[in-house]
């Protein structure tokens, strides 16, 4: 298995940039970060990145311990086995709304699966990435994607992007 530095050196430069790999924290864009579940000791790092909103995709965890000054918490709970258009639209709308205030951190437990599909869909809907390119980052970006969640790549490869874009335009944020 390659070391972290070897893995980082071989990363596709279009993929998210490692910020703090121990927390699976990566910069997707200047306004979007992704990570595993943040901990209270991450407050200074999160604040130093200018993050204004933390969006959690965890279904059974409220992030109450993440009461960082100047950082808003938003929940968009997702069941990893049952991710579909309603969950993706809610997540993307929450990101869009929060980015109006500044950088956003999205996370689930590991920062790999629910966070991975939302990041992939963000790449496709906001950045014009192809399905194949988004799936490649999801699986090979060293975020720890768990292949047991076969429904995630299946959704990504089969989602009706035209309909999803329409839902994003017509569904109010937040």
Image (cartoon, rainbow, N blue to C red):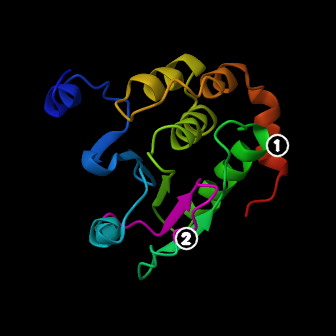
Give the distance between the C-alpha atoms of the residues marked 2 and 1, in whole angstroms: 24 Å
Q: Is residue 28 above or below residue 7?
A: below
Q: Earlier in the sequence, mark 2 or mark 1?
A: 2
Q: Which residue is disc 2 drawn over?
A: 73
Q: Quadrant of the N terminus?
A: top left
Query: Where's residue 146, x and y in %?
Result: 48, 29
Give the residue at x 35% y 72%: 40
Q: Residues within 10 Å of mark 2 (few under 14, many from 20)?
A: some
Please give left or right for residue 63 compared with residue 86 in the image: left
Query: Where's residue 99, x and y in %?
Result: 55, 60
Magenta segment includes 173: no
Q: Residues within 10 Å of mark 1 (few under 14, many from 20)?
A: some
Foreground residue, 11 or 82?
Answer: 82
Please give left or right for residue 25 compared with residue 119 in the image: left
- State the extent of the magenta-drawn residues as a range: 49-63
Give the residue at x 79% y 45%: 86
Give the residue at x 66% y 21%: 154
Q: Which residue is disc 1 drawn over?
A: 167
Q: Quadrant of the C terminus?
A: bottom right
Query: Where's residue 121, x and y in %?
Result: 61, 35
Please give left or right for residue 111 compared with residue 3 in the image: right
Quick check: marks 2 and 1 in contact, CB under 8 Å? no
Query: Where's residue 10, x and y in %?
Result: 23, 22
Foreground residue, 51 or 78?
Answer: 78
Tag 2's secondary structure? Answer: strand
Tag 1's secondary structure? Answer: helix
Magenta: predominant secondary structure element? loop
Q: How many marks?
A: 2
């Amino acid at each position: 298995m390659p070391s972290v530095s070897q893995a980082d050196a071989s990363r596709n430069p279009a993929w998210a940039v490692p910020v703090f790999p121990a927390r699976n924290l990566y910069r997707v864009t200047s306004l979007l970060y992704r990570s595993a579940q943040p901990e209270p000791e991450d407050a200074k790092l999160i604040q130093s990145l200018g993050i204004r909103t933390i969006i959690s995709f965890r279904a059974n965890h409220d992030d109450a311990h993440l009461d960082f000054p100047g950082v808003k918490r938003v929940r968009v709970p997702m069941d990893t086995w049952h991710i579909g258009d309603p969950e993706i639209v809610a997540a993307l709308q929450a990101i869009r709304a929060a980015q109006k205030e500044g950088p956003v951190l999205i996370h689930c437990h590991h920062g790999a699966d629910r966070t991975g599909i939302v990041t992939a869909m963000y790449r496709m809907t906001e950045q014009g990435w192809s399905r194949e390119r988004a799936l490649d980052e999801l699986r090979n970006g060293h975020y720890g994607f768990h292949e047991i969640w076969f429904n995630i790549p299946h959704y990504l490869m089969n989602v009706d992007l035209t309909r999803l874009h329409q839902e994003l335009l017509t569904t109010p944020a937040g």
